Amino acid sequence: MWRLGVRTARGNLTEQIKKTLARWWTEWLRSVLLIILLITAFRSAVADWNDVPTGSMKPTIFEGDRIVVNKLAYDLKVPYTTRRILQWGDPQRGDIVVLHSPADGKRLVKRVVGTPGDTVAMSDDHLIVNGEEITYAPLAPGLVSGRTPGVSGRFLATEHLDEVPHAVMISPGVHCLRTFGPVQLAQSSYFVMGDNRDESFDSRYFGPVSRDQIVGQATIVAASVDPERHYFPRWGRFLHPLR
């Protein structure tokens, strides 16, 4: 009788545990998993953010910026894949894009300077597209927002790339590839560079990137912190549009 009572008690406890787990699954865990699935699918196919750890896009984007990536800028992809469902556009010269590096697959933020069919070259830090040298001017007001870190001894200028003015930075004395090309871009190939021209790992080194490697367009700085000042917020860069 005693053993029968023990087995009955164990059976009742097991049944109670099963009921508790089933209730936990139906009332809580299933909802949490659904929310996680929806959030990750949204970030995969619609919009995401990207923390910027390096200064390759200074003075446009700083270390510590968190940028918004519009993944619907050019097309709609199946979540978690690079397969396109619909396409309504392609990256244009001057667009700031997030891409997977052909070198190691890491996510990079760069500017498109050459599109399919273009011929891209550079001579002593002066960009040349389709045989025409891009014009440069002193840095225009409003192109850089907030305190610009790490520009001592550098030259800042406005680069006019197909009527899209943006800031670039030149670093004299830095060993880099200042002259290259010309490079003829094939179908669905893009040439990308950092605005920090002399301190950027870009298409000069890993070559053109394919259309499928471009994740989306960087549109705005959602938030920013300064790593050199104990990650104090850079309030002036919050919601700063990128161009």
Image: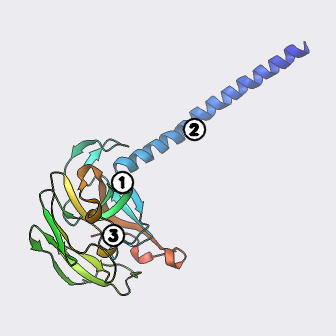
Q: Is residue 41 left or right of residue 11?
A: left
Density class for disc 3 (Cα within 10 Å; few <14, some 14-19, many ≥20) is many
Q: Amino acid at mark 3?
A: Ser
Determine which residue is flagged by label 3.
Answer: 200
Which residue appears at 37% of the width and 69% of the height? 239
Viewer-nearest of discs 3 and 2: 3
- Quarter where residue 129 is shown: bottom left
Q: Tag 3, which secondary structure?
A: loop
Residue closest to the far right: 2
Mark with earlier residue (3, 2): 2
Q: Amino acid at mark 1?
A: Ala
Q: Is residue 135 left or right of residue 242?
A: left
Viewer-nearest of discs 3 and 1: 3
List x then y, in percent, for residue 194.
30, 69
Which residue appears at 15% of the width and 54% of the height? 186
Q: Amino acid at mark 2?
A: Leu
User: Could you tell me which quadrant the C terminus lies in?
Assistant: bottom left
Q: Which mark is residue 47?
A: 1
List x then y, in percent, for residue 62.
39, 73
Mark with earlier residue (1, 2): 2
* Contact check, label 3 and label 1, Cβ < 8 Å: no
Density class for disc 2 (Cα within 10 Å; few <14, some 14-19, many ≥20) is some
User: Could you tell me which quadrant the N terminus lies in?
Assistant: top right
Q: Tag 2, which secondary structure?
A: helix
Q: Tag 1, which secondary structure?
A: strand
- Quarter where residue 102 is shown: bottom left
- Quarter where residue 30 is shown: top right
- Report how far apart the C-alphas of labels 1 and 2 lie in the structure: 25 Å
List x then y, in percent, for residue 113.
20, 66
- Report how far apart the C-alphas of labels 3 and 1 lie in the structure: 25 Å
Determine which residue is flagged by label 2.
Answer: 29
Which residue appears at 41% of the width and 69% of the height? 54
